[in-house]
C-alpha cells in the first residue's frame, strides 16, 4: 500500500542565507569559522602555519592582491600558472562585461556555439602540426581525462596500457589520479591498473618499457613537471621520445596544463624541441585568469579514429559546462592579448632575468640555496636540507631530522616573504624543499628586482634569525 503524498499549503521555510554583500564583508575570524565548519578544517592547519589565515583579500588588480586592510601583495604564486594575464586584465574584463550587457547565450548545448567554434579554430591555428581537434572542459583534470580517453579509444583495448613518469601530477579525478604519482593523493582509492611508471626524463627506461610490453599504447608526461619541483627532461629527451613512439605505434600525450600558454616563452613548452605530440591539454591560464576553461587538442587522425563516426561521436562529447559562452570569449580575448601584448616575449625576458639574479643569490647564500632551475616564468628555487644550513659541528646531528623537517625552510621563507615583504610564492607537492615562482606574464623588470631584493634581504638574516623571526612573527602570532 502506497503512502499518501505529504501535502502542505505552507511555503518552505527559508534558511538563513548569506547575501553576496554579506559574504564580501565577512572578517577573517568568521571566514575561519565557516571554513572549519563547512570546507576543510585540516587544510586550515597549514594556512595557520604559514600565517595565511589572517588575510582576507578584498580585490585584485594586475600583479597584486589588495587585502581588506589595504596591503598590496605582489603575486609570484600566480594560482599555479592560472593568473597568466594578471588579475582582472582590463581587456578580458571588458570583453566579459560586453558579453553580459548584450545578454548573450551562456549554455548552448542544443545548438552550435559560435564562441566555442571560434575558440577551437584559434587553438588549432596556434597549435603546431595537425593538432586540430578540440574538446573543452573546465579544469585540467577534466581535459587530461579527455586526452587519455581519446588516446585509449583510438588505440583500442589491446593497447590501452599507459606509461607515465615518477613524480607526475596530472589531476585528482579517478582516471588521471592513477597516473598522478603521489601516495598522498592516491590514498586508498581503487585506481586504474593499466599503467606502468618510469623515471621522468629517462629515455632508456622508456625504451625498455616499450620494447618489452606491446600493450603499452600511450605515454603521458608533463613537458615540465610542476608538482615535482619545476623539473625538465634532459636535452634531446622529447625528440627521442617522439621517435620511440613513432617506432612502436604509441601515442604521446603532452600535459601542458601548467607550462603551456606562453609561460616558458613559447606557447607550448614542447615547441622548443621542434616536436609535436599526438594529444595535448591546456587549462589554468586559458580562461584569461577570469574563467574556468580547459582544452584537449588532438591530432585530427586520432580524434576521427576515436570519435569520428556518428555512432561514436557522443562517447565523449562536450559536457554541460564545456564551452560555456563567457568562458570561451574570455579565452578568445586572452589569446589575442597574449600575442598583441607580447606576453610570451615578456615571459622569456623576465624569466631569464629572474634566473640570472637568483643564481647570483645562490652564489651569495650557498648554505641556504641548492639550485635554481626553470624556463620562462616557471622557476624553481630549491633550498638545502636544514642540516646543510647549520655550522659544521651541528650538521651530522641535524641530518637525522632532515626528512622530518623537509619543507620547513620553504615554509619559513614563504611565510616571512608574505609577513614582512608583502610577497606571495608557491610551494610544491613532491619536493617540499622547492619554492616555485609562477607570476603573471605581465610582470615588469622592476617587480622582478623588487622580489630579488626582498629574498636577498631575508636570506641575509641567516638560518637562526629566519627561524626565530618565523616563530616570533608567524607561529606565535597565529595563536
Image (cartoon, rainbow, N blue to C red):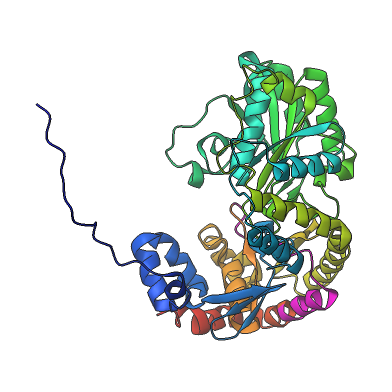
Looking at the figure, which quarter contains the N terminus? top left
Side of 57 relative to 351 (left or right): left
The spot of residue 173 in percent (x, y) is 52, 40
* Residues drawn in magenta: 430-454
Q: Nearer the viewer, residue 333 or 5?
A: 5
Q: Is residue 15 above or below residue 419?
A: above
Q: Is residue 276 above or below residue 104?
A: above
Side of 111 relative to 177 (left or right): right
The image quadrant that residue 310 belongs to is top right
At x 48% / y 78%, what residue is drawn? Answer: 54
Q: Is residue 383 visible?
A: no
Q: Residue furthest left?
A: 1
Side of 363 relative to 305 (left or right): right
Q: Is residue 413 above or below residue 288?
A: below
Q: Is residue 302 visible?
A: yes
Q: Nearer the viewer, residue 283 or 53?
A: 283
The spot of residue 226 in percent (x, y) is 68, 51
The image quadrant that residue 271 belongs to is top right
The spot of residue 394 in percent (x, y) is 58, 71
Task: Report if residue 450 lies within the magenta region.
Answer: yes
**How many badges with numbers are in the image?**
0
The spot of residue 479 in percent (x, y) is 39, 80
Q: Nearer the viewer, residue 284 or 118?
A: 118
Amino acid at each position: 500500500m502506497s503512502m499518501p503524498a505529504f501535502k502542505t499549503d505552507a511555503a518552505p521555510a527559508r534558511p538563513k542565507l548569506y547575501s553576496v554583500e554579506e559574504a564580501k564583508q565577512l572578517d577573517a575570524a568568521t571566514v575561519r569559522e565557516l571554513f572549519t565548519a563547512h570546507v576543510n578544517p585540516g587544510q586550515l592547519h597549514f594556512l595557520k602555519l604559514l600565517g595565511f589565515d589572517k588575510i582576507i583579500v578584498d580585490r585584485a588588480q594586475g600583479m597584486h592582491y589588495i587585502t581588506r586592510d589595504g596591503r598590496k601583495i605582489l603575486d609570484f604564486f600566480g594560482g599555479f600558472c592560472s593568473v597568466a594575464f594578471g588579475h582582472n586584465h582590463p581587456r578580458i574584463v571588458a570583453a566579459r562585461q560586453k558579453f553580459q550587457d548584450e545578454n548573450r547565450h551562456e549554455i548552448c548545448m542544443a545548438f552550435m556555439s559560435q564562441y566555442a567554434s571560434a575558440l577551437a579554430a584559434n587553438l588549432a591555428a596556434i597549435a603546431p602540426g595537425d593538432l586540430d581537434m578540440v574538446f573543452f572542459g573546465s579544469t585540467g583534470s577534466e581535459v587530461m581525462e579527455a586526452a587519455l580517453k581519446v588516446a585509449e579509444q583510438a588505440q583500442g583495448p589491446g593497447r590501452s596500457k599507459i606509461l607515465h613518469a615518477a613524480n607526475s601530477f596530472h589531476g585528482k579525478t579517478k582516471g588521471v589520479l592513477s597516473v598522478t604519482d603521489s601516495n598522498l593523493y592516491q590514498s586508498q582509492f581503487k585506481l586504474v591498473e593499466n599503467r606502468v611508471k618510469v623515471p621522468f626524463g629517462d629515455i632508456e627506461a622508456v625504451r625498455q618499457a616499450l620494447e618489452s610490453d606491446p600493450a603499452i599504447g600511450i605515454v603521458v608526461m608533463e613537458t615540465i613537471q610542476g608538482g615535482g619541483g619545476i623539473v625538465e627532461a634532459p636535452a634531446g629527451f622529447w625528440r627521442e621520445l617522439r621517435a620511440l613512439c613513432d617506432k612502436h605505434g604509441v601515442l604521446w600525450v603532452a600535459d601542458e596544463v601548467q607550462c603551456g600558454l606562453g609561460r616558458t616563452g613559447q606557447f607550448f613548452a614542447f615547441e622548443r624541441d621542434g616536436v609535436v605530440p599526438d594529444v595535448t591539454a591546456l587549462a589554468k591560464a586559458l580562461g584569461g585568469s577570469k574563467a574556468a576553461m580547459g582544452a584537449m587538442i588532438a591530432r585530427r587522425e586520432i580524434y576521427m579514429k576515436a570519435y569520428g563516426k556518428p555512432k561514436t561521436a557522443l562517447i565523449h562529447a562536450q559536457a554541460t559546462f564545456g564551452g560555456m559562452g563567457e568562458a570561451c570569449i574570455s579565452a578568445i580575448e586572452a589569446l589575442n592579448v597574449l600575442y598583441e601584448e607580447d606576453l610570451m616575449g615578456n615571459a622569456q625576458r623576465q624569466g631569464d632575468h629572474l634566473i640570472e639574479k637568483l643564481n647570483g643569490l645562490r652564489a651569495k647564500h650557498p648554505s641556504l640555496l641548492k639550485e635554481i632551475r626553470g624556463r620562462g616564468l616557471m622557476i624553481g628555487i630549491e633550498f638545502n636540507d636544514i642540516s646543510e644550513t647549520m655550522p659544521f659541528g651541528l650538521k651530522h646531528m641535524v641530518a637525522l631530522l632532515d626528512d622530518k623537517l623537509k619543507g620547513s625552510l620553504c615554509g619559513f621563507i614563504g611565510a616571512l616573504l608574505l609577513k614582512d615583504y608583502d610577497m606571495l610564492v608557491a610551494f610544491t607537492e613532491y619536493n617540499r624543499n622547492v619554492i616555485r615562482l609562477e607570476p603573471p606574464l605581465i610582470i615588469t623588470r622592476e617587480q622582478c628586482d623588487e622580489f630579488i631584493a626582498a629574498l636577498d634581504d631575508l636570506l641575509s638574516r641567516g638560518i637562526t634569525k629566519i627561524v626565530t623571526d618565523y616563530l616570533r612573527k608567524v607561529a606565535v602570532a597565529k595563536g
